[in-house]
Image (cartoon, grey):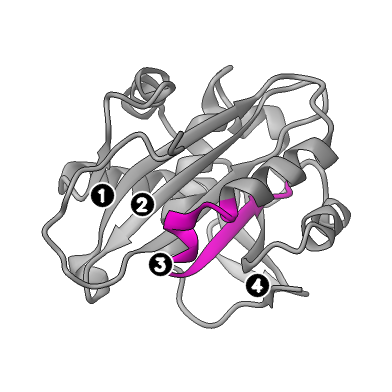
Amino acid sequence: MNIFESGADFGYAQKPQYFIGLDLGRITEVSALAVLQRTGMSKDLYKFECRHLHRWQARTTYEEIAKETHRILRHPDILMGKPASLAIDATIVGPNVMDLFRREHTAARLETVFITGGNEAKKENGVHKIPKRDLVALVQIYLQSKRLKIAEELSESEMLIRELQTFTAKNTPTETDTYNSWREGSNDDLLFAGALALWSGNAPGPAVFYSF
């Protein structure tokens, strides 16, 4: 069965590109993945469609998540598009967990992200430090301009739409924001997975590819 449950057409003829966001929680929490398809020739014309959502229940091992993520990345629709990008929230698990995804021979642009409560996005030692409010604002911009579509037939779409509609960013003055203070609801895993994918689809500059 095709994992991409939605087939909406934005009307673009060029080859699509896929951006995947992975929100990793503690081992006792839910983790989530979102796949966005991007079309459009330039940033001001970009449109995104959420093509797949996946949640892992609490106590799913990170190794299992890495293997399933690799399987999704090997889907024919993704392989036939432009090189995909995988942005992983390592705020809680740390960068060492990224080795699991490298060992799974992930054929994608791999980006490690720490979500912070700061005011400035920056990259240090290969890690992107992104303010929470930047991610939330990006999602709001695309939703308000109707350039982000979430197909109702996706199994987790109702939950994601509800989180997008009700989420309110609570900005804090430092970069040492704790996990519980920015993951505000029990289903924010889907929201941040989608936000990471959207951020990756707008991120400038080159990133490292792992394809073994």
Mark 3 element type:
loop
User: Which numbered disc, 3 or 2, marks the residue closer to the eye?
Assistant: 3
Q: Which residue lies furthest to the left in this view?
A: 11
Which residue: 37% across, 42% down? 51
Q: How far apart are the alpha carbons under marks 3 and 2?
A: 24 Å
Image mark for residue 123: 4
Sequence order check: which comes first, mark 4 or mark 3?
A: 3
145 left or right, relative to 209:
left
Q: Residues within 10 Å of mark 3 (few under 14, many from 20)?
A: some
Q: Is residue 140 above or below residue 120?
A: above
Magenta residues, as a range?
Answer: 73-91
| Image spot of residue 76 (x, y percent) | 48, 56
For label 1, the residue is: 142
Residue type, numbered disc 1: Tyr
- Position above or below: 6 against 87: above
Q: Mark 2 points at which residue?
A: 138
